[in-house]
Image (tube, grey):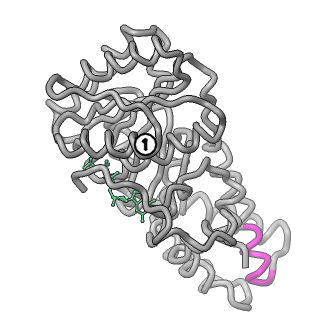
Amino acid sequence: MFGFKKPKEASNAPPAQLSWAERLKAGLAKTRGQIGSLFSRRKIDAELLEELESTLLMADCGIDATAWLLEQLKLAVKRDKLETSDQLRAALATLLLQLLAPLEEPLDAGRGKPFIMMIAGVNGAGKTTSIGKLAKHFQGQGLSVLLAAGDTFRAAAREQLKAWGERNDVTVIAQESGDSAAVIFDAIHAAKARGIDVVLADTAGRLPTQLHLMEEIAKVKRVIQKTDPGAPHEVLLVLDANIGQNAIQQVKAFDKAIGVSGLAVTKLDGSAKGGVLAAIARQCPKPVRFIGVGEGIDDLRPFSAEEFVEALLEP
Ligand SMILES: Nc1nc2c(ncn2[C@@H]2O[C@H](COP(=O)(O)OP(=O)(O)OP(=O)(O)O)[C@@H](O)[C@H]2O)c(=O)[nH]1
């Protein structure tokens, strides 16, 4: 939790022949299993709808999204004279897609030069490892990347980020001493001088209840704004899917402090709480830029509502 853990490459990497869609499906297996088991050749009746309601709640869709989905499903059952559980599953897929599609807003790194991205979140959410994955993602688009070691609370975080940068040929700006804002400020100037395309600025993990730390991160943002009035071009909040409903509070608190412009939802693999995206869509909609389904370097990808719904509900 307190270190930059290099994303695992060979050892834990999923078999290369698996497509992203298959890995997503495998990653979402727990949530998928809960919902899927309901639709095994049954007739639609009140009992099935009740079970579906509890299952959606257990998958952390939240009361609001669950109520909306159930209400819409009941309307569809009447209107379209649905009878089988397969038809119900298809109707649920359509509704879920309707709910999640507005969250699909891929990141456009052309919005700034350098495109400055500030990464925030609670401890252990997956910020630092996601930075490694994002660096690879942007490099894959032919963009040059610079990392700012803005997690100045832990020397280990800085050292691990530096080591990761060296191994992967990515420049890392770090300082032995100095606060987070100063490190990131210097990094942006270095990026400008070197004509870098994307700056990924790490920040230390913090809880929304640690008000002094929330004030500190607001200051980091103000300092970034001094380098370029449009910056940061993205304030990415990293959320661990396993926190379920707590995600709502985290989004609201970080949004209030630093104006969150996008989310990365990590650790959807092994989580039975994949429904949290539906809760976010209803209660605090923010673009979901990336989702993470594993520790491998390729396991963080841009969010596609269609792929997600298919992975969750396709038989
Ligand atoms: N299974 C799984 N593990 C992940 C995923 N993303 C990150 N992790 C793991 O989560 C752990 C914590 O990740 P970090 O990147 O260190 O988290 P952090 O937010 O930087 O933590 P602090 O620096 O303590 O604030 C590491 O072991 C990562 O490998 C994911 O999508 N799936």
The magenta-colored residue range is 83-91
Residue at horizontal 64%, vertical 38%? 106
Q: Nearer the viewer, residue 168 or 121?
A: 168
Residue 48 lies within the magenta run: no
Place of residue 277 in the rendered image (x, y in percent of width and height, measured from the top left): 52, 55
Q: Does the Cβ of the disc 1 residue fall within 8 Å of ligand 1?
A: yes
Residue at horizontal 74%, vertical 75%? 88
Is residue 214 among what the camera can see?
yes
Instruction: Give the SS element for disc 1.
Output: helix
Q: Nearer the viewer, residue 117 or 91?
A: 117
Residue at horizontal 54%, vertical 44%? 136
Is residue 50 among what the camera can see?
no
Place of residue 201 in the rendered image (x, y in percent of width and height, measured from the top left): 38, 30
Q: Nearer the viewer, residue 148 or 253?
A: 148
Label 1 belongs to which residue? 131
Which image quarter holds the C terminus? bottom right
The quarter of the displayed image where residue 104 is located: top right
Place of residue 254 in the rendered image (x, y in percent of width and height, measured from the top left): 34, 35
* Amino acid type, label 1: Ile
Which image quarter holds the N terminus? bottom left
Q: Quadrant of ligand 1?
A: bottom left
